[in-house]
Image: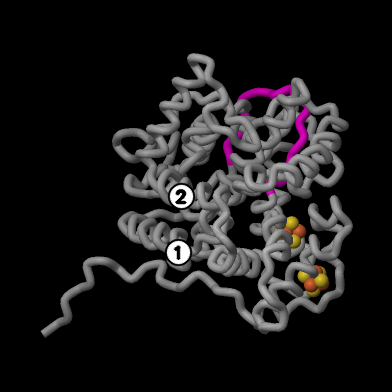
Amino acid sequence: MSPTPDPSPQVGREPFPRLSDDDLATCVHCGLCLDACPTFRQTGLETESPRGRIYLMTQWKRGQLEFKEEQVRHIDLCLGCRTCEAVCPSGVPYGRIIEAGRAEVEARRRPDPKRGIAKTALRQLVGHPQRLRAFGSMTRVAQYVGITNVVRSGRQLPRLRPAFKPPASGGAPAIGARKHRVAFLVGCVMPILYPQSHDAAVKLLQLAGCEVWFPKEERCCGALHAHNGDLEAAEKLREHNSRVYATGEFDALIVDSAGCGSHLKDFYPDLKGRVKDLSEWLVEIGLPEPRRDVKMKVTYQDACHLAHAQRIKKQPRELIRAIPGVELVEMRHPDICCGAAGLYSTLEPQMSQRILDEKLADLTATKAEIVVTANPGCQMQLESGLRARRSHIRVEHVSELLVRAFL
Ligand code: SF4
Ligand code: SF4
């Protein structure tokens, strides 16, 4: 008798990595990462550097250092931006180390109301698309009637537009000949905060000959949960989404949020090689000739999880430079974090603000009219900082800039 097929395929089952001696031992303490680390640049303290944090976690792991709350601060202050990983000559997997380290910290620290609320919000709100949409609708109404501080956070929410809605059919056709079939990550907060970025991204994909599939039951990818040390919730979301993706056929899963793309590439083994950042994919398959000039002076802020975690720096710049009329001016240190880092600006507002202030000084020095980036957290952080300075510089997702050339 043949075995009964398993109704739920065993997808996405590899456990999230826990803090490992092998990973920690890859650090040779050379210090070449120090000047690239935003928190070391601000404080000059070894304990706020990648090397110092790795040393701390190694000592805990070996039982050579007692776990103390004041040392936890050094882990909390890490942005998880992975700049250190990108410059490390020894191949230290810092992103994996810090996410595993955070999970250990969360399991052992004294209850912290602020972090407790963040964890509950991530589990009960961000992980549930319908609840999040309802929250978005209520916030839109509150903004409309003038109650703008509904959510007290390190940064203000942008003025919300109607949320991004995939077509009822679950798909959007290619414009012209169909060359590819792609899935599109709608995600959790992005369709609510920046629906226009998704609209532009989908339009670009269609123009490039892609039929776009929006997996209906898809939920948050779990990046924010993993980033905050809640690997259990991240694992559950991955298992759910992996089952959803297994129901469709597609050449690539397109992601226009750098943090999500990095998480999917690292922690969704079933999707290996098929997760593509929007700019990475568009450079790979090519866009049609632009229809019009876009006369603008533009600067580009690298999102950390695109530049450092996915090592994608050239592609967005290549696409921007290909738009006739655009003048791309580089700011000083475009690949240093803006201080957004998921919930960091809410949980660590002082350090986030110090990092943002330096970023805004570099950004405004370019005299650009518009700053483009590729992650909703960076968009919100930069918008909030520029608004506070009463600056006229606009912030857009790279997709919004590109699509102007095709309207
Ligand atoms: S993380 Fe890499 S660059 Fe930094 S001290 Fe360790 S080995 Fe050197
Ligand atoms: S992830 Fe970013 S903030 Fe954390 S140690 Fe590395 S460079 Fe510094």
Q: Is residue 352 left or right of residue 283?
A: right
Residue 145 numbered tag:
none
Question: How packed is label 1: few (under 14 Cα within 10 Å), some, or many (20 or more)?
Answer: some
Q: Which residue is mark 1?
A: 232
Q: Which residue is mark 2?
A: 120
Residue 115 x/y as whole percent: 56, 51
Q: Is residue 295 above or below residue 34?
A: above
Front tag of 1 and 2 = 2
Q: Is residue 4 left or right of residue 279?
A: left
Quarter location, residue 324: top right
Task: Tell me which residue sits at (66%, 83%) in the image.
Answer: 63
Alpha-carbon span between mark 1 and mark 2 = 13 Å
Magenta-highlighted residues: 287-303
Label 1 CB less than 8 angstroms from ligand 2 = no
Task: Tell me which residue sits at (61%, 26%) in the image.
Answer: 404
> Is residue 115 something that shows in the picture?
yes
Q: Quadrant of ligand 1?
A: bottom right
Most prominent secondary structure in the magenta stretch?
A: loop
- Quadrant where the C terminus lies? top right
Colour scheme of the rendered structure = one colour
Task: Tell me which residue sits at (77%, 65%) in the image.
Answer: 50
Task: Tell me which residue sits at (58%, 28%) in the image.
Answer: 158
Amino acid identity at mark 2: Thr
Residue 20 or residue 393, whichever sits in front: 20
Q: Within the magenta stretch, is there residue 302?
A: yes
User: Which residue of the protein is positioned furthest toward the left in this rendering?
Assistant: 1
Q: Is residue 142 above or below residue 121?
A: above
Q: Is residue 208 left or right of residue 349?
A: left
